[in-house]
Image (tube, helix red, strand yellow):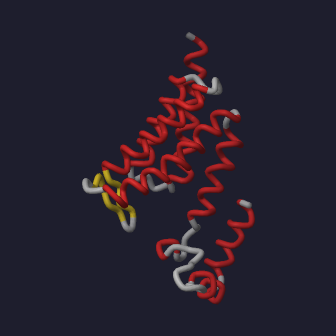
Amino acid sequence: MLAISLLADIFRISWKRAERVLEKEHLKGFKIYKEKERKRISSITTFLLGIFLAFLLFKFIIAFASIGFLVFGDMMAKIIRVNYGKRSIWQYNTHNKTLEGTVGFMAMSVSVAYFLWCVNLLSLGTGIIGALTATLVESLPFPIDDNVSVPVLSGAMMTLAQSLFLKL
């Protein structure tokens, strides 16, 4: 799926006619690409890249947790930001991070960590470190898309935490 999405992005970006066809609204209210994705790799591709890298770089449960932080945390952040977001942390181009959305992201990420601990798949300490890392990465204006940076950096911190905890 990553390869197909990446090829579609390359095709769309490099061929002007394809760009016009793929970026216009075909049905009322239905578009494939966001306006901010003009001349850029799509969020679909970066999301799939983040998943691919997580499974490539980390043990299964670490990858699973880091993707859970991304999927559920991002979903909650958006719902909270849209409905209750009042205090802007920062704005850059079309991105607007709010304190309320960040707290929603953190709450959901900690919930993912707690669930994985409850079903005995991940230590609570490792999960909390991953959840807090994911929240920090998602809330800061990194130049790398958070669909990639959240699973990779939270997965790296959980891997580091596991190796440190095992040596104690």
Percent of width and height locating residue 30: 56, 79
Q: Residue at x 57, y 44 (%)?
A: 151
* Quadrant in the picture for residue 25: bottom right
| Farthest left residue in view | 87
Percent of width and height locating residue 153: 53, 40
The C terminus lies in quadrant: top right
Q: Residue at x 53, y 43 (%)?
A: 69
* Quadrant in the picture for residue 46: bottom right
- Residues 144 and 112: in front is 112
Q: Residue at x 69, y 33 (%)?
A: 59
Examine the rendered structure and indicate whether residue 45 appears above or below residue 22: above
Examine the rendered structure and indicate whether residue 19 appears above or below residue 103: below
| Farthest top residue in view | 168
The N terminus lies in quadrant: bottom right
Examine the rendered structure and indicate whether residue 44 appears above or below residue 33: above
Left or right: where does residue 44 sit relative to residue 85?
Answer: right
Percent of width and height locating residue 150: 52, 46
Q: Residue at x 35, y 55 (%)?
A: 97
